[in-house]
Image (cartoon, helix red, strand yellow):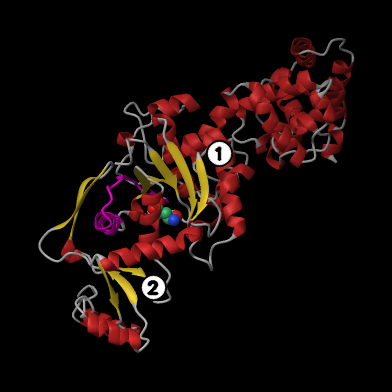
Amino acid sequence: MGDQGEIRVRFPPSPTGYLHIGGARTAIYNWLYAQKTGGKLILRIEDTDAERSTQESIQGIVDGLRWLGITWEEGPYFQTAYAEEHREAAQRLLKSGHAYKCFCTQEELEHKREEAKRRKEDFHYDGTCRNLSSEEIAKLEAEGRPYVIRFKVPRGPGGVVFEDAVYGVIEKKYRDLEDFVIVRSNGLPLYILSNAVDDIRDRISHVIRGQDHLANTPKQVLIYEALGERLPQFAHMPLTLDPQKRKISKRAHGEVVAVQYYRQRGFLPWALVNFLVLLGWSTSDNREFFSRSELIDAFSLAGINRANSVFDIRKDDPKFFTDPKALSINAHYIRTMPLEELLPYVEAELKAAGLWDPAFAGDKRPWFASTVDLIRSRYHTTNDFADLGRAYFADDFPIDEKVLVKNILKHESLKDWLPLMAERLQSIGEFTAETVEQSIRGLAEELDIKAGILINGARAAVTGQAAGPGLFDVLAAVGKERVVQRLRAVPELFA
Ligand code: GLU
């Protein structure tokens, strides 16, 4: 396992799209393991698919990792830079008799595949070229016949055995493995080879990756052994599925599985890390929330579950647009994180929405901080500060249609009572939650009505919402001038 016990893990994304939550989770597990053990995380961009790899994707992956707070010690390395090394490894395998040149043509293979299908058998390459003599090979090469390089899987009753930190001892019988291709006829090495050769060069001690790669591992174990290298510790993580038990993927689910999407929709990076780590890992007491140091402390490969986890995609629900648990974890952090750490996120939201006033960082700073503190308790995302919280920061804000009807229009008298409230509030000297409460309760008594009618009506008129923090605190936060203005304008709502 690695050299001199040094822990070295890697995150090797293929840059063919955005960083999605599955990839981010893999990166997080590797990062946590490195942090926990004092090891190193290596970022390796597996860009060998020239047609699908893009610079934009590489940038997106790096930005996404940085945003999540994932740090790496080495890289990014680029797999394409090592193509020669991969080919050399294939040459070594040829020389040592662990691989051979296969001249079978596509047509021949296709024909055999068809025949196997007819017999209702799985097609495994039959080893036609496995034992060609050096004369035969020389002749075929002299004819310019193209060839692939295949790995020579041992024949016989045994199998490849390795121990996975999550799935335990795994054995794959030799008879269930075909002589797999490691270099294409155009000379390009295949992922199965390049990935293993890179892990060897990068002295990777622990390969922590998705369970979808478990089928590759026996072949890679054979490559390691044939090259005379020690195996890394493998740890395969369970898959993340959607509620219909489909694998989460960019293709099937679109942007809702992109890390960038969560960033745009008002997720705090740590909340997303906290949510993602729980998709396939848990502590024995099923803890839900972790600070960074708590998570690093608690993380272990032994805590990775074998059962697949479910990501409850709800992209069609505009309010709860994602997994409810993800939202509730985000809400938890919005509610409880140190206010000073939250403010920059709110500032960024307000700026993006055109609601930022430079004074919020100047003389209005105490007001800004206390208002954010007041309203954050009910919010799920930082977007909510600009959407649901718009009335605190702007004069133009929508009043939810249902709320308007239920809390204002259904009570005809509010057309007079709310402007009356405006006049009372106007005359208050010091505009605080206490003085506002006194005034409103006094008015309700005078009118001989329940204060609730005034309170609900005022909340709708001043904030556009039906719910929120205590109304008196809300009015104090919105401020006398704006409150009075909004209550005076209520008759217009009846028009
Ligand atoms: N490039 C591969 C992927 O993105 C890496 C697989 C591995 O971790 O070995 O799936």
Q: Is residue 37 in the magenta section?
A: no
Amino acid type at circle 2 is Arg
Height in image: 274 above or below 44? above
361 on left or right of 129 = right
- Could you say which is closer to the camera, residue 300 or residue 469? 300
* Residue holding disc 2: 184
Q: Does the residue labelled 1 lie within 8 Å of ligand 1?
A: no
The location of residue 305, given as percent across then percent down, is: 31, 40
Secondary structure beneath dot 2 equals loop
- The answer to whether residue 308 is seen in the rendering is yes
Q: Which residue sits at x=67%, y=20%?
A: 470
In this picture, which residue range is highlighted in magenta?
217-242
Q: Which one is in front in this view, the residue at disc 2 or the one at disc 1? A: 2
Where residue 53 sits, quadrant-wise, is bottom right
Q: Residue 329 bears which disc, if any?
A: none
The location of residue 73, given as percent across then percent down, is: 50, 39
